[in-house]
Amino acid sequence: MMKLDKDLEKLLKRAEKPARYIGGEVNSVIKDPETVDVRVGFAFPDTYEIGMSYMGLQILYHILNSNDRIYCERVFAPAPDMEGLMREDGRQLFTLETFTPVKELDILGFTLQYELSFTNVLNMLDLAGIPIRSKERAEDDPVVLAGGPCAFNPEPLAEFIDAFLVGDGEELLEQVCLARKGCDSKEEFLKKICKMDGVYVPKFYEPVYKEDGTIDHIKKLYEDAPDRVKRAVLQDLDKAEFPVNNIVPFIDTVHDRSVVETFRGCTRGCRFCQAGMIYRPVRERKKETIKSLAQRQLANTGHEELSLLSLSTSDYSRFEELATELMELCKEQNVALSLPSLRLDSFSFKVLQEIQKYRKSGLTFAPEAGSQRLRDIINKNITEENIYSSVEQAIRLGWETIKLYFMAGLPGETEEDLAGIAEIARNIMDINFKIRGRKGGRFRVTVSVSNFVPKAHTPFQWEPQNRPEQFIEKHDFLSGKLRIKGVTFNYHETETSNLEAVFARGDRRICDLLERAFRLGCKFDGWSEHFNHELWQQAFEETGIEADFYNYRRRDYDEILPWDIIDPLITKEFLIGENEKAKAAQVTADCRQGCAGCGINRYAECFRGAELKISGKSAPDPDLRRSVDGLGSNQKQEGGA
């Protein structure tokens, strides 16, 4: 570890949680910068505690640093107290590994996990002494990259980012970093990498607008740039690099545990869910690989908890075997096992009963909607019988805390659907009373309601979002209906949900809004204590940007959308079909029961069970699970930049 200079040491003595900024943790990587070809900063636009809980950082940090030609260092957004001290002292943003000013790196790559982190991206560039607009940077400034789920609509950041990496990052990011060496200019580098699947260079495209503000066409400014950018897809997840020497923070982080990704993608097809669309197809790791990674990671980190990572843990094709063997492994090593996102069937309860013998934490259900009709509209393939039978089983087994997640403002929602949320909570309280009688007085139900935000590349990407006054009216309605003894009601703030939608479906003109808000002092917008609605209103007024255009109008199927430049490998025809089925409250079965025709089979060869390979163009037998191997195109869930 490189030593702190005396000035920085003095600064840290005045900062809250100085361990956020000193590096040197167990398993962090120290190289001699003089011996590498490319120096990369992996930048997480939030505090250390949040960034170090993100498994994608650990994955890409490990992959890049396994290459002797690359040195990857970490960069986080300083907390407001530390930023104030740095600006007062003239200290620029630096890396944790060597305390090198970020401005001296070759590449700076941001991960974009949440739209409300965008002002932090600009603030970090400014704190690093790097011009925030790409066109204003000099040749000796770092190339600024960005990836992650928000890169699937790159346009609201297009004026600030040199290149976006879209899709799985494990192979792509390393290729891009290695391409930097040997290019005499940034222009040469960008022209080289734009030909790779998954790389979008905004300066090579220019949107042309109609008088009504919609996009007429996308003008291509560099002939060799692709017409559309195919997302990058990792071909074989089981053989992909995965870290076992994870960095162990000195201070508590949001998730302080060992994590192994079991599979990537989801087959359930919820129509509001962006992750379920953009991470297709499902790709699994072998059970033996998962166990080996878990054992080695626990041995190398000393963590006291192991968690599995996926969009739906119990959808893993050999879940029962895996869970049983991991329970035994964790019992032998006195390690807690966490299995999030379980489908609460009889086996899952057996697993939960085993891993929570002595202290039962809360159980979480996500009905999403208060009526079967609305659950069919959003393609949430669960029934009230599924909910109530699972709750009854949980209560009989001793659980005393149930959390329920719903959404407000979903397409097709009525007041009856909202009333159904309260009815579900009341019925659960009644079930508890019938089983436990007065002994069940400690039983608690928490109802959490988030606001629907239409996202790119989903069947609901054309749908309008509720206006602020509509959300407020719905929250007030639910507050009245949920005045039930033993029930707690939480809901998401309206202003942040509406702002999130502006960035989720915005075009390149949103860059001016974002910069103005940053100049006014907006940052850490995802934190309720830092979000400043008045400053954002001022930014909207001064730039002439209207939320109505981006949030509250229904878009036609033939409208060119800002994110159409990105090819997610699922077809727009499929998304339109799903939107039409939603209007008719028709459901689409889980992909594991048969191909739904989303288009990913153009790029994938699927297999059934663990061994038998079949043609990617054929639908698998309905009763057989499947995962995906050997994609035919050099195309993240957690591995994105």
Image: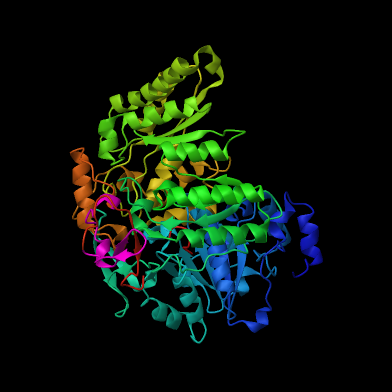
Above or below, comparing residue 128 to residue 38 in the picture: above
Left-right relation of 202 to 29: left
Above or below, comparing residue 391 to residue 333 in the picture: above
Q: Residue at x 37, y 50 (%)?
A: 545
Q: Residue at x 40, y 58 (%)?
A: 156
Please identify the quadrant where the N terminus is shown.
Answer: bottom right
Q: Is residue 393 visible?
A: yes
> At which x and y percent is residue 214?
25, 55
> At which x and y percent is residue 26?
70, 62
Q: Nearer the viewer, residue 211 or 506?
A: 506
Looking at the picture, the colour scheme in use is: rainbow
Left-right relation of 413 to 301: left
Total number of numbered discs in the rendering: 0
Asked if the stretch drawn in magenta spans residue 18, the answer is no
> At which x and y percent is residue 567?
30, 64
Q: Nearer the viewer, residue 84 or 373?
A: 373
Q: Is residue 541 visible?
A: no
Residue 230 sits in which quadrant? Answer: bottom left
Q: Residue at x 35, y 50 (%)?
A: 455
Residue 38 sits in which quadrant? Answer: bottom right
Asked if the stretch drawn in magenta spans residue 594, the answer is yes
The span picked out in magenta is: 592-617
> At which x and y percent is residue 210?
23, 58
